Image: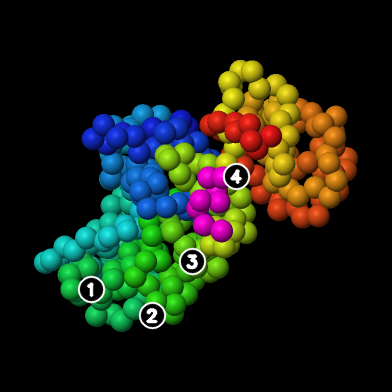
Amino acid sequence: MLSIRNLHVEIANKKILNGINLNVQNGETHAIMGRNGSGKSTLANVIAGKLEDGVDGAVLYDGVDLLELDPEERAREGVFLAFQHPIEIPGVNNIYLIKAAVNSIRKHHGESEVDAIDFLKMVRKKMELLSIPESFLYRSVNDGFSGGEKKRNEILQLLMLEPKLVILDETDSGLDIDALKVVSKAVNSLSREGRSTIIVTHFPRILDYIVPDYVHVLAEGQIVMSGDKTLAHELERFGYSWVMQHRPAAVAWDQVNFPVIWLNEVLSWCSACRGLQSRIFMPCAPLPSRALGTLDCQPWETKRGGTPTFSRWDGWHLNPHEKPKSISPSRK
């Protein structure tokens, strides 16, 4: 569904994103985590079209480069961004905004506009899922709303528009535990229908309710580590400095055609995608270099017919499709 290729973003002569590569398939949920200022929200804004200047690379969505489309065109094609800080629109009622947005998308797909009676039936059903009172419909968009109410209102719009790609930019901020559970249940109802989700967050709390297929750590404008949901809890335990200590490193790209062994890592050349594949482990015994070799991006055991002896197998990888940045001799 979504393929981000070598995405670079520069704002006011400052590099924010420095070569992002990411693939999101239909029905997948990906979490983007990282420190403040790491570029998480910038990535979300670029996908949705909120940020257009200083952008280079490709963001392919069902084969179409989103960077060539205006924000409203992306929205009609099924891209939805729930803002980190939803804006207030005094004088415009929720019911008119949502109804206009729904009919705009229906018109784009060659469908007839929904009438007022059917629309009310639809929106009341979604509001019930979010435990939102009907008075929300007749209030100005986010005007005078609390932080939690704004986030629920964003998710109401999400449920009504039923996009194919959902981007949640720190939706968990400002939500208490009960509200987080309600919002997560609503998002999960869309995921079960085959829609894809990207969650931008600092903390793993929301990932206990919206369980990701993949977790990616963003630092210095790059995805420096990827894994499954357990990676989020490793981050909570050890912090982001731990990620930087264990990130893969760069050698001359065209010269890497042999495996490199580190104390707690195996880095091997991927013959299929010309990337570097890594698995973190703690060996019970030294791993002989002859056990390594070129392999494609599949789990070790499926390619070798057996696994080395490990005391712990995390099952997550470091940045398999990107060039690493530097090799530290002290870690060899």
**Tag nearer the camera, 1 or 2:** 1
Q: Which residues are magenta?
A: 238-245
Mark 4 or mark 2, whichever is nearer to me: 4
Circle number at residue 145? 1
Residue linked to disc 2: 131
Horizontal side of residue 41 vs 234, given as left or right: left
What's the residue at 59%, 22% (across, down)? Answer: 253
Question: Is 243 colored magenta in this rendering?
Answer: yes
Proximity of marks 4 and 2: CB atoms separated by less than 8 Å: no
- Indicate which disc, 4 or 2, sits on the residue closer to the N terminus: 2
Query: What is the three-letter code of the residue carrying label 2?
Result: Ser
Above or below, 219 against 196 in this view is above
Pointer 4 local density, CA inside 10 Å: few below 14, some 14–19, many at least 20: some
Badge 4 amino acid: His
Residue closer to the observer: 158 or 215? 215
Are discs 2 and 3 less than 8 Å apart at CB? no
Q: Amino acid at mark 3?
A: Ile
Task: Indicate the position of residue 53 as horizontal and vertical percent values.
Answer: 26, 34
Contact, CB < 8 Å: mark 1 with mark 3?
no
State the residue position of label 3.
206
Label 4 residue SS: helix
